[in-house]
């Protein structure tokens, strides 16, 4: 069930059975010449939406701008400062826990968010620890590409040129989610360079078209669909475990 498509009495009824919510969290940043700027938000959003539809678990709005200062050398990229993101995440968490939600599972689509999400969790838990109170809430983050079966499937689908940024897998997932946004672009070089970076100017110099190590011209919606189906099944199993609740709807096979 999508929070944005529910009326409050439906949310109220849900919370009598389950006190958990999934929050997709991503970024708004360049993803190379053929990748959507929304890629890191769209991937967890589509996986969570399909898992929510199959399982009945509540899926909240997508937290869709994250830590992307290093991408600001490319048109369209947006970022939060880490301190801003920690504050905003805590307001999201406190809004949800006010209603009795005690398990929040963040399905993350962007590696650059990981440390800041962990810092936001520490900020939330510190309120209880400093008061000498026991926190009734558990927070968890998980990268969608680390869900069971995904790395094996990515290796099978893209034995060469999966890469680290603007990966063939993530671009495939967005093409499955939004086929009207598919772009056909020749990659030069075929496989992008790899390496480290600091700020936006350094990133742009090192990775001129935005990709790192990938050849996303291999991306197709069919491959994206296989990735979403595998991720969705793994997500439902993990979330059931974390929430301590079986799916509210039995998925039709
Ligand atoms: Zn990405």
Image (cartoon, helix red, strand yellow):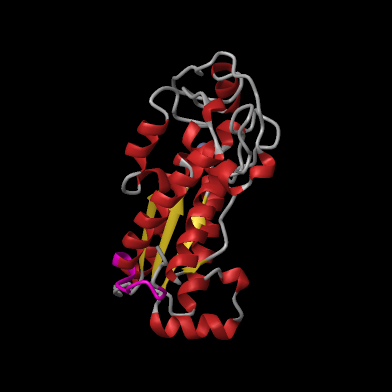
* Residue at position x 42%, y 85% in the image: 16
Nearer-the-camera pick, 181 or 94: 181
Q: Quadrant of residue 7?
A: bottom right
Residue 138 percent across, percent down from the top left = 34, 66
Nearer-the-camera pick, 80 or 32: 32
In the picture as drawn, the residue positioned furthest to the top comes out as: 189
Residue 11 percent across, percent down from the top left = 53, 80
Q: Using the rendered image of the protein, determine whether residue 122 is visible from the camera's viewpoint.
A: no
Q: Which portion, as a residue range, is magenta?
A: 241-249
Q: Does the magenta run of residues contain 42?
A: no
Q: Quadrant of residue 242?
A: bottom left
In the picture as drawn, the residue positioned furthest to the front comes out as: 253
The number of discs equals 0
Nearer-the-camera pick, 134 or 105: 105
* Residue at position x 42%, y 29% in the image: 158
* Residue at position x 56%, y 55% in the image: 63
- Judged by its main secondary structure, the magenta piece is loop
Q: Is residue 221 above or below residue 130?
A: above
Q: Using the rendered image of the protein, determine whether residue 39 is visible from the camera's viewpoint.
A: yes
Q: Is residue 36 above or below residue 84?
A: above
Q: Quadrant of the C terminus?
A: bottom left
Residue 234 percent across, percent down from the top left = 35, 55
Q: Is residue 115 above or below residue 121?
A: above
């Amino acid at each position: 069930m999508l929070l944005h498509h529910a009326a409050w009495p439906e949310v109220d009824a849900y919370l009598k059975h389950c006190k958990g919510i999934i929050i997709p969290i991503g970024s708004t940043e360049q993803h190379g010449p053929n990748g959507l700027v929304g890629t890191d938000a769209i991937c967890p959003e589509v996986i969570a939406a399909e898992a929510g539809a199959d399982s009945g678990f509540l899926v909240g709005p997508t937290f869709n701008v994250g830590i992307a200062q290093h991408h600001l050398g490319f048109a369209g990229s947006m970022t939060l400062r880490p301190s801003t993101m920690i504050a905003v995440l805590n307001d999201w968490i406190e809004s949800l826990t006010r209603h009795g939600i005690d398990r929040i599972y963040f399905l993350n689509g962007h590696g650059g968010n990981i440390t800041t999400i962990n810092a936001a969790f520490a900020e939330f838990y510190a309120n209880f620890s400093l008061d000498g109170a026991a926190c009734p809430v558990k927070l968890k983050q998980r990268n969608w590409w680390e869900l069971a079966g995904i790395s094996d499937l990515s290796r099978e689908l893209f034995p060469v040129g999966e890469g680290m940024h603007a990966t063939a897998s993530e671009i495939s997932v967005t093409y499955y989610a939004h086929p009207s946004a598919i772009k056909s672009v020749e990659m030069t070089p075929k496989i992008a360079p790899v390496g480290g970076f600091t700020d936006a100017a350094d990133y742009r110099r090192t990775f001129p078209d935005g990709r790192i190590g990938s050849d996303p011209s291999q991306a197709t919606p069919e491959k994206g669909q296989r990735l979403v189906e595998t991720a969705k099944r793994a997500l439902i199993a993990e979330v059931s475990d974390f929430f301590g609740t079986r799916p509210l709807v039995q998925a039709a096979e």
